[in-house]
């Protein structure tokens, strides 16, 4: 922790290292209080670097015991976070031997080597390896690692590291050892070790090429019965990457280890992925359908990193999206392929876009806005963002759209052909995809396309159409613009693939012939917008059509389609693109909320046209239940807030709640039907079909409870309560609990007590118990009750500030996912926020910084929220001891 403000690290300052490290031999004498690390590095001068440079190694919170160069002692000095050897041997290659200690037990940051539930675990991305030993801790330095682990055999029976197990055996004093060798050169951020009392599920698989591999999932004793889904997901991931991208598993053994204390979701260490338990452990009794889907996608994500991230890694951390954007794209595609039917694919796409808009769009409009490839940072941990991950994935998706599915595969092949084993840049990736597709819209516009990497902010795309009956022409004019963002006052136009179609008002997909073309080319095409404004003229259009634009959300932009209700209802009914049907429904709801926002009264009664359209979707036998659930759920409060120049979180909450209340009342008979018609009677499977039915039935239950509580009718709350007690699986139990809490039923308290009882100490179930209370809908009359409950829960014996999952479930959910409870006129939510951020910063700065981001959008808040929020931010910023992590967030917010 530094006291002074950290200075920014800049992308333009990148310089290759003065030395390379070719091999590393590490020996660990593991002990939670004091671990001794012996490191032997084969160092080579970089002939391309300026001669005479010092050897500067990173090191943080370490005690140095010894430092020898080629067996001789060498003089060194310590600088802030660095070990400087001013005069290393004047040779091209030499050996450096280091011996140091670290204290895993005291490591509450969970970066480096730390303890969790009696075991020892590492987390090295981005800069954790330097908290284990002195090293050139940067991703462009790739070395072959050999690792010896020594530890007490009874306490740490399992000793794991990257690659292959070479040898193991007993030592004196009840200790034992294991030697591991990873044949692939890797950067230090991919190093991992685990020493713990674990058990594993294992499975042998044979890859397409006939090679045998051992897959293992390690968990704590007692959790083995919750590893089946993770293993199935891993097997599916291996098969998918081979089938879709021709990328096989390159190791004999591939391990996943679950750990309860983890800052992020999971980590792709070579051959030894370390996972947050949340993304490994699942049984029908403890995990929801959403949890099962999360496991599949994260297991896939980490596995896919083996090629996109590990075999080809990042030259520097500014290129983080090179591996993350691409790997998110790959995991999204994997989940879509696993979902199966076209409609299940669309549901996954809608989910992903919802997430992008809920998190990335606000980020891109706030003080932390940064390009997919950032230009500067103070603390790299703050740049594991929705922009780098999810917007980065959208950029890859646009490339895939521009070159087509086969073209993208060719591009990936070329990328591996050129760069396997290297540390490269986002430019290298884009170049490979373009070069494999000469003449494509991507290749032709590559320089301009790359603005997507360089410019922050969400571009706005405006569409206006005009139809001429006499010429039978429809002219579509597309305009793009982008607002300034921090450090970027002027924006260049982007290359936007706009997948589109035209629909007649009676629902036909019209053949599309652009002016100058001989014949129509199908009913869907991709317009590529490169100018600030362009018009596209469609021929042979008899009547004014409804344009369906940006199908499948083909570019990460805000679309102003200018369409009125009638056209939106046509799209909702007839569009061939499921994403745009959903989008039309959302827009209809949004328009009604936005129209009422400026006033002070209640939401006016929803018009029949809207209610009928919602009913038609709900009752449509041709539509999937999962899709219906998405359409019938109004846009979230955060998304509504992003549409406002000035945000009143209380008003948004009230109107949205009133909208739900009206939907509950007006569609009462339909909800009854939906509940009855979507009960799953066969045994539990977390697949798209069953989970879709459960999602819709549970939305119906929520609406029935909401309506019943308003009318004082005890029947549906009683049923929901019964569900909390009897449900055979977590999806339904959890949904019933939420329905009672968010419906403000008096039965909620009893249901919570029951839920806590059946949790029986299961950490992941307890996390849900905390989160359900922190996310509880604030009652409209009076309100303000949620914060009181959250404060009381801080003192609950099951709560701990030190466990990231628990902290996120209570403090994170409250500050970041419950705007109406958080933004209070009396500022008590902000005081709570500031207290927690400061308290947590001393324990775990990475997580503190994530919570700190709850205030990102304070500038758009209405008074009195705005002034109170500024005051809370200023209090945190004025604290004498702040980590670089939190300082960067609060100082940018106040800039
Ligand atoms: N690289 C990890 C992933 O996206 C995320 C991560 C980053 C985990 C930093 C831990 C620390 O898969
Ligand atoms: Zn990743």
Image (spheres, rainbow, N blue to C red):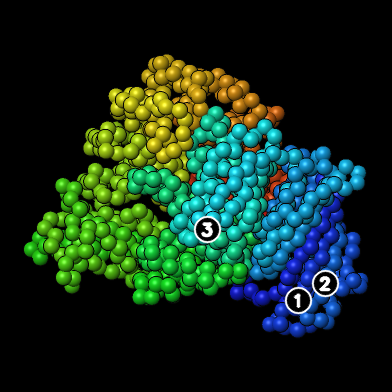
Where is residue 305 drawn, in percent x and y? 57, 57
Element carrying mark 2: strand
Residue at (29%, 56%) from the top-left corner? 549
> Do we see residue 481 in this rendering?
no
Ligand 1 within 8 Å, label 2 CB: no
Identify the image quadrant of the N terminus: bottom right
Neighbour class for label 3 at 10 Å: few (<14), some, many (≥20)? few
Neighbour class for label 1 at 10 Å: few (<14), some, many (≥20)? some
Whether pointer 3 and pointer 2 mark residues with C-beta atoms closer than 8 Å, the reply is: no
Examine the rendered structure and indicate whether residue 213 appears above or below residue 407. Answer: above
Residue ranking furthest to the left: 470
- Quadrant of res 715: top left
Dot 1 or dot 2: first in sequence order is: 1
Near-viewer residue (158 or 634)? 158
Which mark identifies residue 95? Answer: 2
Q: Which residue is mark 1?
A: 44
**CA separation, marks 1 and 2?**
9 Å
Where is residue 625 drawn, in percent x and y? 35, 36
Where is residue 445 drawn, in percent x and y? 39, 74
**CA separation, marks 1 and 3?**
37 Å
Q: Is residue 7 left or right of residue 696?
A: right
Q: Is residue 379 left or right of residue 370?
A: right
Which mark identifies residue 209? Answer: 3
Element carrying mark 1: strand
Element carrying mark 3: loop
Labels 1, 3: front one: 3
Near-viewer residue (272 or 602)? 272
Identify the image quadrant of the C terminus: bottom right
- Quadrant of res 17: bottom right
């Amino acid at each position: 922790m530094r006291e002074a403000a950290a200075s920014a690290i800049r992308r333009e300052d990148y310089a290759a290292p003065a030395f390379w490290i070719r091999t590393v031999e590490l020996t660990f004498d593991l002990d939670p209080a004091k671990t001794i690390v012996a490191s032997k590095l084969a160092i080579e001068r970089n002939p391309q670097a300026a001669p005479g440079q010092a050897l500067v190694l990173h090191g943080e919170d370490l005690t140095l015991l010894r430092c020898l160069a080629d067996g001789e002692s060498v003089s060194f000095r310590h600088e802030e976070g660095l070990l400087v050897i001013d005069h290393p041997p004047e040779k091209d290659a030499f050996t450096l031997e280091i011996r140091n200690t670290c204290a895993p037990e005291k490591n509450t940051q969970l970066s480096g080597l730390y303890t969790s539930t009696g075991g020892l675990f590492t987390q090295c991305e981005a800069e954790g390896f330097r908290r284990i030993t002195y090293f050139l801790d940067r991703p462009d330095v790739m070395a072959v690692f050999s690792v010896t682990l020594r530890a007490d055999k009874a306490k740490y029976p399992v000793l794991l590291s990257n690659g292959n197990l070479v040898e193991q055996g007993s030592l004196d004093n009840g200790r034992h050892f294991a030697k591991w060798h990873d044949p692939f050169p890797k950067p230090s951020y991919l190093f991992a070790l685990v020493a713990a009392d674990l058990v594993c599920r294992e499975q042998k698989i044979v890859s397409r090429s006939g090679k045998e591999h051992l897959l293992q999932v390690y968990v704590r004793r007692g959790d083995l019965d919750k590893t089946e889904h993770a293993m199935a997901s891993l097997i599916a991931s291996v098969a998918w990457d081979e089938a879709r991208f021709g990328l096989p598993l390159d190791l004999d053994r591939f391990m996943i280890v679950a750990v309860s204390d983890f800052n992020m979701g999971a980590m792709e260490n070579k051959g030894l992925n370390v996972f947050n338990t949340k993304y490994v452990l699942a049984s029908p009794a403890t995990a929801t359908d959403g949890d099962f889907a999360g496991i599949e996608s994260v297991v896939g994500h980490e596995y896919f990193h083996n090629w996109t991230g590990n075999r080809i890694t990042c030259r520097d951390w500014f290129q983080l999206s090179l591996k993350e954007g691409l790997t998110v794209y790959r995991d999204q595609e994997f989940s879509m392929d696993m979902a199966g039917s076209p409609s299940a694919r669309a549901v996954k796409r809608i989910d992903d876009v919802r997430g992008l808009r809920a998190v990335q769009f606000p980020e891109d409009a706030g003080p932390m806005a940064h390009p997919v490839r950032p230009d500067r940072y103070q603390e790299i941990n703050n740049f594991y963002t929705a922009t780098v991950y999810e917007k980065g994935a959208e950029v890859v998706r646009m490339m895939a759209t521009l070159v087509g599915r086969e073209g993208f595969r060719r591009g990936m092949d070329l990328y591996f052909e050129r760069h396997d084993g290297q540390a490269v840049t986002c430019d290298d990736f884009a170049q490979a995809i373009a070069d494999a597709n000469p003449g494509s819209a991507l290749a032709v516009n590559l320089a301009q396309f790359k603005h997507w990497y360089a410019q922050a902010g969400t571009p706005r795309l405006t569409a206006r159409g005009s139809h001429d009956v006499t010429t039978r022409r429809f002219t579509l004019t597309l305009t793009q613009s982008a607002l300034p963002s921090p450090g970027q006052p002027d924006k260049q136009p982007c290359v936007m693939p706009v997948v589109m179609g035209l629909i007649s008002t009676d629902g036909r997909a019209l053949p599309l012939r652009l002016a100058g073309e001989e014949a129509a080319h199908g009913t869907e095409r991709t317009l590529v917008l490169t100018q600030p404004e362009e018009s596209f003229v469609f021929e042979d259009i008899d009547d004014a059509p409804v344009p369906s634009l940006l199908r499948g959300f083909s570019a990460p932009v805000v679309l102003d389609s200018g369409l009125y209700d009638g056209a939106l209802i046509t799209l909702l009914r007839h569009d061939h693109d499921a994403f745009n049907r959903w989008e039309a429904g959302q827009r209809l709801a949004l328009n009604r909320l936005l129209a009422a926002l400026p006033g002070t009264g209640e939401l006016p009664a929803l018009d029949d046209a809207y209610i009928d359209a919602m009913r038609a979707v709900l009752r449509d036998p041709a539509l999937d239940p999962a899709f219906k659930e998405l359409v019938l759920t109004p846009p979230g409060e955060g998304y509504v807030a992003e549409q406002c120049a000035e945000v009143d979180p209380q008003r948004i909450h009230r109107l949205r709640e009133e909208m739900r209340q009206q939907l509950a009342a007006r569609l009462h008979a339909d909800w009854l039907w939906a509940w009855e018609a979507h009960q799953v009677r066969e045994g539990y499977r977390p697949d798209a079909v069953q989970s879709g039915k459960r999602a819709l039935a549970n939305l119906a239950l929520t609406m029935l409870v909401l309506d019943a509580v308003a009318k004082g009718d005890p029947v549906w709350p009683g049923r929901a309560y019964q569900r909390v007690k009897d449900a055979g699986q977590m999806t339904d139990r959890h949904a019933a609990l939420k329905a009672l809490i968010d419906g403000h039923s008096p039965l909620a308290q009893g249901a919570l007590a029951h839920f806590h009882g059946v949790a029986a100490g299961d950490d992941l179930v307890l996390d849900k118990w905390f989160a359900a209370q922190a996310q509880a809908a604030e009652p409209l009359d009076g309100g303000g009750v949620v914060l009181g409950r959250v404060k009381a829960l801080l003192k609950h014996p099951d709560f701990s500030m030190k466990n990231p999952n628990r902290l996120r479930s209570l403090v994170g959910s409250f500050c970041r996912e419950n705007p109406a409870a958080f933004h209070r006129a009396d500022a008590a939510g902000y005081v709570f926020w500031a207290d927690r951020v400061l308290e947590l910063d001393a324990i775990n700065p990475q997580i503190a910084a994530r919570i700190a981001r709850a205030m990102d959008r304070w500038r758009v808040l209405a008074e009195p929220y705005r002034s109170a929020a500024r005051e809370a931010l200023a209090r945190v910023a004025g604290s004498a001891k702040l980590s670089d992590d939190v300082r960067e967030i609060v100082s940018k917010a106040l800039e």
